[in-house]
Image (cartoon, helix red, strand yellow):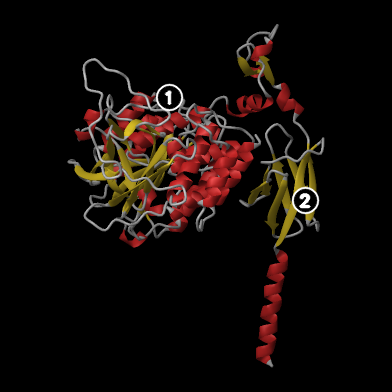
Amino acid sequence: MKKITVIMSLVLIFNSCIISARTITGTVYDVNKKPLPGVNVMVKGTSKGAITDLNGFFSIAVNDDNAILIFTYIGFIKEEIKTGKSSNLTIILTEDIAELSEVVVTGYGVMKKSVMTGAVSSVRSECLQSYSDMSYDMEYNNEGYATIAENGFKDPKQAPLSTFSIDVDAASYSNMRRFVKNGSIPPSDAVRVEEMINYFDYDYPQPTGEHPFKIIYELGECPWNKDNKLLHIGLQGKKFLNKEVPPSNLVFLIDVSGSMSDENKLPLLKKAFKLLVSQLRAEDKVAMVVYAGSSGLVLPSTSGCEKEKIINALDLLQSGGSTAGAAGLKLAYEVAKDNFMKDGNNRIIIATDGDFNVGQSSNEEMERLIVKYREKGIFISVAGFGMGNYKDDKMEIIADKGNGNYSYIDNLMEAKKVFINEFSSTLYTIAKDVKIQIEFNPAYVAEYRLVGYENRLMADKDFDNDKKDAGEMGAGHTVTALYEIVPVGGKDSYSPKLKYQATEPQPAKPGNGEFATIKFRYKKPDGDKSILMEMIIPNKTVSAAQASDNFKFSASVAGFGMLLRSSEFKGENTYDNVIELARSSKGSDNDGYRAEFINLVELAKHL
């Protein structure tokens, strides 16, 4: 009888737990009863969130009848709704007239009234911008992005070699996601196509030989130009279990200036770093440096087993003051140097919106400081937060020059991806100064174009120069690069008549010849001399039906990036084509990142 009573009690407790959590659904409209896609829905006081679909529909789990939902959308007044006992809600958002009135359209663009120094007397009609442009300027007009001049096609008879540094950063993808979910198409310079491609993992085989990564390739039909081919090249870094990763000497360098007060900055940062702390081992050490008007050490180097002490230090952080970023960086390097682990991973992780506006703040000065310590074995990774005054260009330089990764964290799920799912690859470098050089055979290739990697291009002669810095690979990282190929005799094939060199291609046997030769150079994490790998790519094209999911999904992401950039090379691509290709190659998608990508494309299609 007692056993039955205990069982019944457990059943009642279990049922009460189920009942306490319920799902709220609803639809969000504007005052004209038009559905609003891309509205952010958050459960107040939690990290739970959702986004409305193309029909304005949302679904979100709440714990009790007292839950409050927060609805935010650019250009509309924020609404807070208590759920009560309702299971289905209809929400009407009202345009924020006050916000719109702070914007004035001038003959040169859009300015806020607060920054205008004189009256506006007239406006030329051709200079008027759409509301979407206005909303972008209102929210993001102080963000900084490096200019990208898109790669064009090259003739292998004149430029037989294509040389570039690898890039495993993925900040551009999550930053793009932030724009799209907030109802805007990102500025073209914020879209780095290679980072969008490399945001995703691909099903590449693990390396088995002496090298820490494996090379794969696939030559198939180009989805956005049926007359061309697409060459897919992939690298798979060797995976390590957490227990196999060397001990880490970490320094958290945290921006606590006044610009970090927003909910998606310091509060989100604290939650993100707590996830990282949860992964630390006893042999790992963490110190914490903060900077605002001045810099200071708030936590000396502490064992990873003292998690409560580290988390308490995070909880005490508050924002305020100006941003003396350079002073904080100098102090962080000193702390890392004082606790240096000879056979370990010595790394600074800087978390900021990148707005270094006091002190030593020029890109050149920051670069020299970072390179100095990089050569001493102290690397640096960057985690970007926030919007409005976000300085993507500075953070990209810091990570590139510091032999580290650059991530943009727009929500707690992205923090989980970076600091838990990709923990070892985020923190442990298995190969540095990784360079790729491809020589195309003009017997088969009339023209080629590297998709993305514009800010990673290298001079051909620097491939063999071990003094030239290049990209790094972390444990388990994948790197993917795509080339669009115009085949000899193809529709877009162009052969100039040159005076001083032979233009006739060397004879080759179709289907049996060498399409290209690919070379890789890399150094061991503590090495100074590079190691060369080389592979022949045969002239063998797979049909669209035979193409792998790796090939098709990476092509869909590249196509989306080109659409966002309004690229002149987007060919016949459309949002519908991208969605169809991505759906056909989604695969198992255990973490849901590919499904989210498809939803983003569907949302961007209607922006």
Residue 131 falls left or right of residue 483? right
**Which disc, if any, is residue 265?**
none
**What residue is shown at x 41% (from left), y 58% (from top)?**
306
Residue 456 falls left or right of residue 355? left
How many other residues sit within 10 Å of disc 2, few (<14), some (14-19) or many (≥20)?
some
Residue farthest toward the bottom in the current orientation of the protein:
1
**Which disc, if any, is residue 82?**
2
From mark 2 to mark 1, how far is it between C-alphas?
A: 49 Å
Viewer-closest of 45 and 540 = 540
**Front label number (2 vs 1):** 1
- Dot 1 falls on a residue whose secondary structure is loop
Are circles 2 and 1 on residues that touch, CB within 8 Å? no
Does residue 502 lie above or below 186 as drawn?
above
Callout 1 amino acid: Ala
Residue 438, image x and y in percent?
Answer: 28, 36
Viewer-closest of 376 and 226 = 226
**What residue is shown at x 33% (from left), y 62% (from top)?**
243
Residue 159 falls left or right of residue 348? left
**What residue is shown at x 43% (from left), y 44% (from top)?**
198
Residue 487, image x and y in percent?
Answer: 36, 34
- Dot 2 falls on a residue whose secondary structure is strand
Tag 1 residue = 149
Residue 348 falls left or right of residue 309? left
* Mark before the other along the chain sequence, 2 or 1: 2
Quarter of the C terminus within the rendering: top right
Q: Quadrant of residue 13?
A: bottom right
Callout 2 amino acid: Lys
Viewer-closest of 53 and 474 = 53
